[in-house]
Amino acid sequence: SSSPPRHTTPLPPVVSPSHLKSVIDRCSSLFRGFQQHDAHEFMAWLVDAVHEDVKFEVQKEFPTNSEIQNGPEVSDAQASEETWEKTRARDDSEVIRMFRGMQRSSTQCMECGNESRNFETFMYLSVPIPKTRTVAVTVMVMDETAMEEGRGKGGVGNDEEMEKNEEKKEKNGKAGATTTTTTT
């Protein structure tokens, strides 16, 4: 009788949730105990902890905001590149390179037209998700002639088709459109 084949590569270790929790408790007092925390809070802490462990040696002196060229003669590409290099000179790691983004904001004077640009790096981008939303759904009911003419693919059409369909409905009472508003 032959024996079953043996695995030549080791299986990945299994980590129990209680062991993971105890390791996190030792690393951060923020998560000690059994209070509820959200996923963003935990991920922000974890990404920052990894960044601190793997960050590169950085310059002790780095340019200040006032040293970055920000006049109208400097392109957005140049100004953003300078801001990015300044950020990397101060704080750099593979985590920063993979997860940090940059946002451009500008303010323009209504009287003189002078524009001030600002480039800022960010690590987390919060996007609000509404609890409810209203969706307008238009359903077109078309007769065979309209379908044969190729209008209303799948029973859904554009505004021009809707107007034609409404006119047709008024003439012969066969086709029409209904608008339904749904809140989810």
Image (cartoon, rainbow, N blue to C red):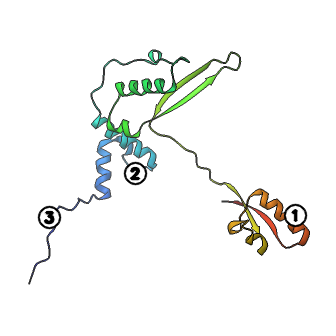
**Left or right: 5 with respect to 179?**
left
Q: Secondary structure at mark 2?
A: loop
Q: Earlier in the sequence, mark 2 or mark 3?
A: 3
- In this orientation, which residue lies closer to the viewer: 37 or 149? 149
Q: Secondary structure at mark 1?
A: helix
C-alpha distance separating marks 2 and 3: 40 Å
Q: In this orientation, does residue 143 appear?
A: no
Residue pictured at 27% horizontal, 57% vertical = 15
- In this orientation, which residue lies closer to the viewer: 164 or 46? 164
Q: Earlier in the sequence, mark 3 or mark 1?
A: 3
Q: Quadrant of residue 153?
A: bottom right
Q: Amino acid at mark 2?
A: Phe
- For label 2, the residue is 34
Above or below — where is 104 with respect to 71? below
Q: Position of residue 41 (x, y in %)?
A: 44, 44
Q: Position of residue 72 (x, y in %)?
A: 56, 18
**Left or right: 154 with respect to 62?**
right
Residue pictured at 33% horizontal, 17% vertical = 61
- For label 1, the residue is 167
Q: Amino acid at mark 1?
A: Glu
Q: Which mark is residue 140?
A: none
Q: Nearer the viewer, mark 1 or mark 2?
A: 1
The 10 Å Cα crowd at callout 3, few under 14, some 14 to 19, many 20 or more, is: few
Question: What count of labels does the image hold?
Answer: 3
User: Which image quadrant: the N terminus?
Assistant: bottom left
Q: In this orientation, does residue 103 appear?
A: yes
Q: Secondary structure at mark 3?
A: loop
Residue pictured at 61% horizontal, 20% vertical = 115
C-alpha distance separating marks 1 and 2: 66 Å
Q: Nearer the viewer, mark 2 or mark 3?
A: 3
- For label 3, the residue is 8
